[in-house]
Amino acid sequence: MRIRTGLAALGLAVSPLAVAAPTSAVTTPALYSCTRVAQHRPATLQLACGDGNGYFDRVQWSQWTQTYATATARQWVNDCKPNCANGHYTKRRVPLRLYAPTTLDFQRYFSKILVGGADGYREPLPRPRRGCATNAEYERVQNGDTQARVSHIFGTTGIDGASHRSYRYCRSGPGYAIYAEIWYENGRVVDKHWSDD
């Protein structure tokens, strides 16, 4: 493995999107459904990511603010009788409320949904996909930081151990892959660097 100190040293043209620091402006939260693609005021919603036995269509949004969003929608639910493959869908009109905005990798999104009606319920919403580490995230990690704090700032994708390394996969191409690596000793950061394989 060749260790280098920056992405530019690897001879790669990194897109501004991959390394841009967050702006000071507060962005309107997005909604992530099973596609994990940011959406604003979508007309359909698929939130049953495992089996697809429930979804919403004809969604009509009345509000979309920095803290919540409200709508009404037609909800389809599979009764799974005698089994889900041969079940029947029923539909009803329900109110929806997105709330609890949060941020992951500088992507602001609604983290919970309230489905109203007689059988109303609350549940968490899908999160954005974790992508390449940004320079802003990387620079926030300092020697001496605890592993828990780094995971909160940076997230992890790949190896994670008490005295090993935790890294975020960044990008790949023919014959190479790039990682942002964080090294620990006794649960505290002792080194960090970009590296390529």
Image: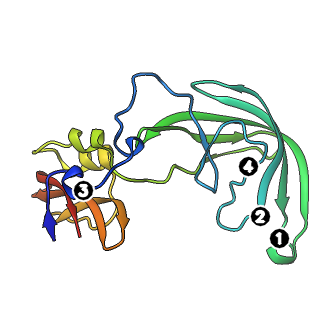
Q: Quadrant of residue 158?
A: bottom left
Marks 4 and 3, the one that precedes in the sequence: 3
According to the picture, the residue beneath numbered tag 4 turns out to be 45
**What amino acid is found at the position of numbered circle 1 in the picture?**
Cys
According to the picture, the residue beneath numbered tag 1 turns out to be 80
Within 10 Å of disc 2 (Cα), the crowding (few <14, some 14-19, many 20+) is: some
Residue at point 65%, 66% (across, down): 50
Instruction: Give the Cα distance between marks 3 and 1.
Output: 54 Å
Marks 3 and 1, the one that precedes in the sequence: 3
Q: Nearer the viewer, mark 2 or mark 1?
A: 2
According to the picture, the residue beneath numbered tag 2 turns out to be 53
Badge 1 marks a residue whose secondary structure is: loop
Badge 4 marks a residue whose secondary structure is: loop
Q: Is residue 83 visible?
A: no
Would you say the residues marked 4 and 3 are in contact, meaning their CB atoms lie under 8 Å apart?
no
**What amino acid is found at the position of numbered circle 2 in the picture?**
Asn
Would you say the residues marked 2 and 1 are in contact, meaning their CB atoms lie under 8 Å apart?
yes
Q: Nearer the viewer, mark 2 or mark 3?
A: 3
Task: Give percent across and percent down for residue 54.
Answer: 77, 58
Residue 115 or residue 27, whichever sits in front: 27
Residue at point 79%, 49% (across, down): 56
Would you say the residues marked 2 and 3 are in contact, meaning their CB atoms lie under 8 Å apart?
no
Task: Give percent across and percent down for residue 26.
Answer: 48, 24
Give the number of the disc on residue 11.
3
Number of on-image labels: 4
